[in-house]
Image (spheres, rainbow, N blue to C red):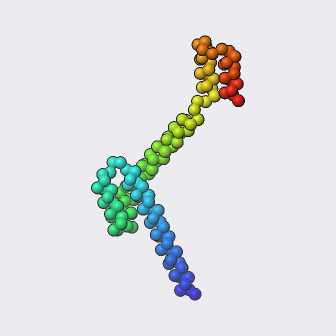
Amino acid sequence: MLDSFLDLLWYTLIVFAFLAYLMILFHILGDLFRDHAMSGITKTLWIIFLIVLPYITAFVYLIVRGPGMAERQGEAQNSARQAADQYIREVAGKSSAEQITDAKALLDAGTITQTEFDTLKAKILS
């Protein structure tokens, strides 16, 4: 009974270590490909060492390049946020206030009549 419990505990520890390594590996690989300052040869060497000496290389990478990983991750998040904001602005178009201001400029220029302005304004506000 105790032997099967210890086997289960050992198996759980091995699975946890493997999953932890996979998470670290994917973070490192993502960081490698995100870093535009590093040459392709250097990236290739890191990947080869990650395959040959996985845990040691992962720990060395985290120690040597760890602070830069957070910066590159932050830059990637900011870039993604800016792209999403830009997309939302493009899709959303002009706000109601901007549309009414444009219509008022057309009214002041004499391009549209007061009735047309009122109709546009009612349509924008509805």
Left or right: residue 84 versus residue 125 is left
Left or right: residue 61 versus residue 109 is left
Q: Nearer the viewer, residue 34 or 64?
A: 34
| Residue at the image position 48 percent from the left and 74 percent from the top | 14
Q: Nearer the viewer, residue 25 or 64?
A: 25
**Horizontal and vertical percent for residue 58?**
39, 63
| Residue at the image position 38 percent from the left and 54 percent from the top | 32
Q: Assign the C terminus to one quadrant of the image.
A: top right
As drawn, 112 above or below 62: above
> Does residue 115 appear anywhere in the picture?
yes
| Residue at the image position 61 percent from the left and 12 percent from the top | 110
| Residue at the image position 32 percent from the left and 51 percent from the top | 38
Q: Assign the N terminus to one quadrant of the image.
A: bottom right
**Horizontal and vertical percent for residue 102?**
59, 21
**Horizontal and vertical percent for residue 19?**
48, 67
As drawn, 60 above or below 77: below
**Residue located farthest toward the left when viewing the structure as drawn:** 41
As drawn, 21 above or below 69: below
Left or right: residue 72 versus residue 42 is right
What is the total number of numbered labels drawn onto the structure image?
Answer: 0
Q: Nearer the viewer, residue 59 or 96?
A: 96
Q: Residue 103 is drawn in which quadrant?
A: top right
**Horizontal and vertical percent for residue 79?**
46, 43
> Does residue 68 appear anywhere in the picture?
no
**Residue located farthest toward the top when viewing the structure as drawn:** 110
